[in-house]
Amino acid sequence: MKPAYAYDVHLPSNMEPGKKYPTIFTLHGKGSNEKNMFGLAAPAADDFIIIGIRGNLTLGAGFQYYDLKSLGNPIREMFDDAVRQLEAFIHYATDQYPVDESRRYLLGFSQGAILSMTLALTMGDHIKGIVALNGYVPGFVKTEYTLKSVQAVSMFISHGEFDSVFPIRIGHETASYFEGLTSGLTFKTYPTDHGVSEENQRDFIKWLRQDAGVHSDKE
């Protein structure tokens, strides 16, 4: 199978032959790329395989996974295709690399966060956890998709208090939605716009390590 997406793979530097590793799949925001997302995940690179998935549609100098009719309103067919193709890609990469199937994580920002939360709902416990930064779950996903239980999926969801793209109330609505579906939710807000602060990054890296049961020498 040829994957639908270009991607980068960063393997831990001291890998042991035959050992499987927890893995973070990164999903970038609209107009960005997988290299920007690696900067967010880099502090976990000694303990995790990091696979950066680049959107397959160009947007200016960057990329996206689907296009929009208007802000917060994805083109449905493109969104459906992205969800299908990303799920297939996760299985493809699991076969290609020493990925621990029981410790697969998604780390997404903005459009990538929207897709990470959607994939948690469609893949259920095939995903161990997600980090979703400044996103939301589209209404049609909640009402029209076939959803799996996320009770066993760990979630770190955060939102900027001054987010000028997706207002903070959307973050609270998203947290309320998942609170009813899983006991494994961590929800935090940060005094930022539509971005990720150093404190936010430190918090989710620590959360990822704890959830995956890995401990860095730096801690």
Image (cartoon, rainbow, N blue to C red):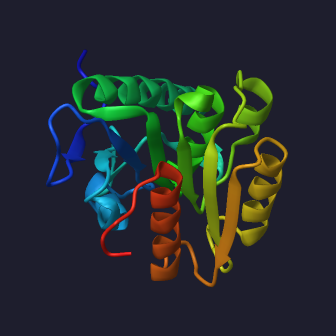
Rendered location of residue 81, percent (x, y): 49, 25
Q: Residue at x 49, y 24 (%)?
A: 84
Residue 100 in which image quadrant: top left
Closer to the camera in the image, 155 or 109? 155
Rendered location of residue 37, percent (x, y): 35, 59
User: Can residue 196 be seen in this snapshot?
Assistant: no
Q: Residue at x 75, y 54 (%)?
A: 174
Q: Residue at x 63, y 41 (%)?
A: 153
Closer to the camera in the image, 162 or 104? 104
Measured along the vertical axis of the image, is residue 18 above or below residue 181? above
Measured along the vertical axis of the image, is residue 97 above or below residue 185? above
Closer to the camera in the image, 47 or 108? 47
Question: The N terminus lies in which quarter of the figure?
Answer: top left
Residue farthest along the bottom direction in this orientation: 191
Q: Residue at x 25, y 59 (%)?
A: 46
Q: How many marks?
A: 0
